[in-house]
Amino acid sequence: MKYYFNSKDGRVYAFDTVELASEWIEQSSDGQDEFREMLNDEIDRHLHPEKYMTNAEKLALKRKDAVYLERHQFLTMTELSLEKNKDALIAAVTKNFKGKSLVKLRNYILESPSFSLDFDELWLLLTAILKIEPDKLFSMWEEARDY
């Protein structure tokens, strides 16, 4: 497989053979000057970006990629796994957050039809305030899909 980077659109193109690549690039409206063959290191970074990420970047990606939970799933998870109902969550939010963060998270818990681990205030509540380890939280989150 041969990989080419198009500097005009920032995309990577893969071809089975150099001949196919050459033919396609010649016919491309972007022109030959826009394409260059990628180096082995660039190809590895493209195919396996997680190998080059910091732990913080991996965690951020895992949070972003976590499924959304529906309201009933999230609230069932907090009651069964954390022994905290909606009122206890709101009490923890009110005690530990102020200003804009308080309003955002309180309204999120009270009104949101779905929940995401990528919502910073919710992540902070669950990991820092309620002291749930990230690995445990991801596990609980996955289990909650079955509720």
Image: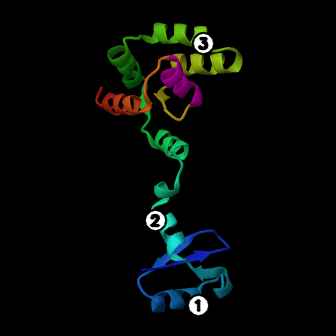
What mark, if any, has residue 26 been given in the picture?
Answer: 1
Image height of 104 relative to 84, above or below: below
Res. 112 in view: no
Query: Is tag 2's residue or tag 3's residue first in the polypeptide sequence?
Result: 2
Which residue appears at 39% of the width and 33% of the height? 135
Q: Please identify, in this view, whether the residue under mark 1 or under mark 3 is nearer the observer.
A: 3
Q: CA distance from mark 2 to mark 3?
A: 42 Å
Which residue is under mark 3?
Answer: 96
Q: Residue at x 41, y 23 (%)?
A: 74
- Would you say the magenta stretch is mainly helix, strand or loop? helix
Q: Amino acid at mark 2?
A: Leu
On the image, numbered disc 2 is attached to which residue? Answer: 47
Q: Is residue 123 visible?
A: yes
Element class at badge 2: helix
Instruction: Name the image colouring.
Output: rainbow
First in residue order: circle 1 vs circle 3: 1
Q: Which residues are magenta?
A: 120-129
- Residue at 54% from the left image edge and 46% from the top image edge: 57
